[in-house]
Amino acid sequence: MAFNQQGNKLPLSQPMVEINTTPLVDVMLVLLVIFIITAPLFQQAVPVDLPKVDASRLDDKPRTVAVAIDAEGGLFVDGVQTDIAHMGQQFVAVVHGGGAEPEMHLRADRATRYERITEVMSAAQRAGLTKIAFVTDGVPAAAVVAR
């Protein structure tokens, strides 16, 4: 029964305003005991004799083609200087080389004309290279603002 602060019995029409936390504490203690008892069971592993097979590891790294464009518009594929016509042939050879879909990593000098970059990208698209990544310097934003 609920009593007011003076110890008098409350009338039946008023609701009880205090929350009874005893059932909550009882349930929490029961759950704590259950977790304490079952926790060591999670540490035990079931011994399983797995089969032995001869399998080679999968190649996780994708094939990449490194393309660099210098300030004068010179093209380099995997470090070797080339022109736009031969570069397209090299892209075709990479795409039809088999295996996973190759990626093109494009590095361009800051002073490179945009037209030269679009020529390289269109040659890559014609050859079937669909994954193109633009490689940049990791200059922090604060250093760019300070310039």
Image (tube, rainbow, N blue to C red):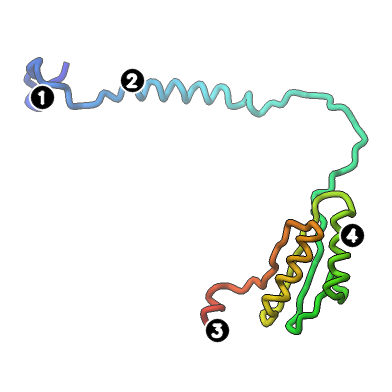
- Taking depth in this image into account, of 119 and 15 the one nearest to the observer is 119
Find residue 52 and report its horizontal and vertical position in percent. Answer: 90, 30
Residue drawn at x 89%, y 59% is 93
Q: Which residue is mark 1?
A: 4
Element carrying mark 3: loop
Q: Disc 3 to disc 1, how far (Cα)?
A: 73 Å
Would residue 24 appear left or right of 18 to someone viewing this image? right
Element carrying mark 4: helix
Element carrying mark 1: loop
Residue 93: mark: 4
Mark nearer the viewer, 4 or 1: 4
Find residue 83 and report its horizontal and vertical position in percent. Answer: 85, 75
Q: Quadrant of residue 66?
A: bottom right
- Taking depth in this image into account, of 9 and 113 the one nearest to the observer is 113
- Tell me if mark 2 has few (under 14), some (14-19) or many (20+) residues whose alpha carbon lies within 10 angstroms of its own: few
2 or 4: tag closer to the N-terminus? 2
Q: Which residue is mark 2?
A: 23
Q: Name the kind of residue labelled 4 in the image.
A: Ala
- Taking depth in this image into account, of 69 and 46 the one nearest to the observer is 69
Q: Name the kind of residue labelled 2 in the image.
A: Pro
Q: Name the kind of residue labelled 1 in the image.
A: Asn
Find residue 48 and report its horizontal and vertical position in percent. Answer: 80, 24
1 or 2: tag closer to the N-terminus? 1
Residue drawn at x 10%, y 21% is 14
3 or 4: tag closer to the N-terminus? 4
Q: Disc 1 to disc 2, how far (Cα)?
A: 22 Å
Above or below, 1 relative to 68 = above
Q: Disc 3 to disc 4, how far (Cα)?
A: 42 Å
> In the rendered picture of this protein, how many numbered marks are placed on residues?
4
Q: Quadrant of residue 56?
A: top right
